[in-house]
Amino acid sequence: MNLLAPYRVLDLTDERGPLAGMMLAALGADVIRVEPPAGSGARRAVPLLAEGPESERSLAFAAYDRGKRSLVLDFGSEADRARLLELVSGADFVLDSGPPSLLDAAGLGFERLRAANPLLVHVRVTPFGADGPAAAWPASDLTLAALGGPMSVQGDRDRAPIRISVPQAWRHAGAEAAVAALIAHARVRTTGEAVFVDVSAQSAMTWTMLN
């Protein structure tokens, strides 16, 4: 399916949200996975194969990063930061995860990206939002499932709640991020202005309760 064939996506997510880029790639977008020299954190996401090159052992990476090209940039290098901005100027979407964010650490927040591309859609996958009182809270699939609500319907009423089955929080957040990217792109086409979208994984888990 090549619905998004004219569009380019720069994917800087770690293990939080790579499904977004995979979904856009499946729709035909050219998705470039931008990684630091040590590789994206997504390459270390469990479960891992017992053998093979360290950067290729993650089954999660194999599943959720298929259909993407890879580019290594050193964000400590001025030349590579300039190269990223050059890529941004020709891209339609930037996906990343935070906090912490590779882009923010490199001084390449939304304002810098928007200056490079006034029609950009920047989507960030976060645990509890990019700002606000809970933004810096530590988060895991377990805590997000608990605070998002799904754990409240797991197990027996007279016993402690139990975790939901396989890790799902970042999968739901990634799917919501892909949808949010396309909605934001429609807004960009209407307003002619770049858009920043903050996708909270906690909110994404709450959405799963709406049935």
Image (cartoon, rainbow, N blue to C red):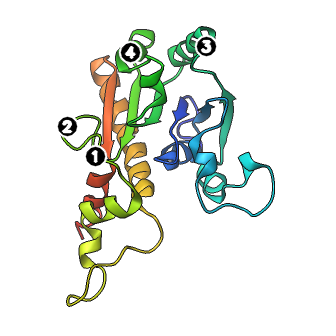
User: Quarter of the image holding residue 105?
Assistant: top left
Name the foreground residue: 80 vs 90. 80
Image point (32%, 58%), residue name? 144
| Mark toward the viewer: 3 or 1 | 3
Per the image, the residue denoted by label 4 is 114
- Choose the circle earlier in sequence order: 3 or 1: 3
Q: Amino acid at mark 1?
A: Phe
Image point (51%, 14%), residue name? 89
Q: Amino acid at mark 3?
A: Ser
Q: Amino acid at mark 2?
A: Gly
Per the image, the residue denoted by label 1 is 128
- Choose the circle earlier in sequence order: 2 or 3: 3
Q: CA distance from mark 1 to mark 2?
A: 8 Å
Q: Position of residue 211 (x, y in %)?
A: 24, 71
10 Å crowding of disc 3: few (<14), some (14-19), many (20+): few
Image point (54%, 34%), residue name? 11
Examine the rendered structure and indicate whether residue 119 appears above or below residue 145.
Answer: above
Examine the rendered structure and indicate whether residue 122 appears above or below residue 80.
Answer: below
Per the image, the residue denoted by label 2 is 132
Q: Position of residue 116 (x, y in %)?
A: 45, 10
Looking at the rendered structure, which numbered label has been put on residue 77? 3
Horizontal side of 172 relative to 35 (left or right) equals: left
Q: Disc 4 on helix, strand or loop?
A: helix
Q: Position of residue 210 (x, y in %)?
A: 22, 66
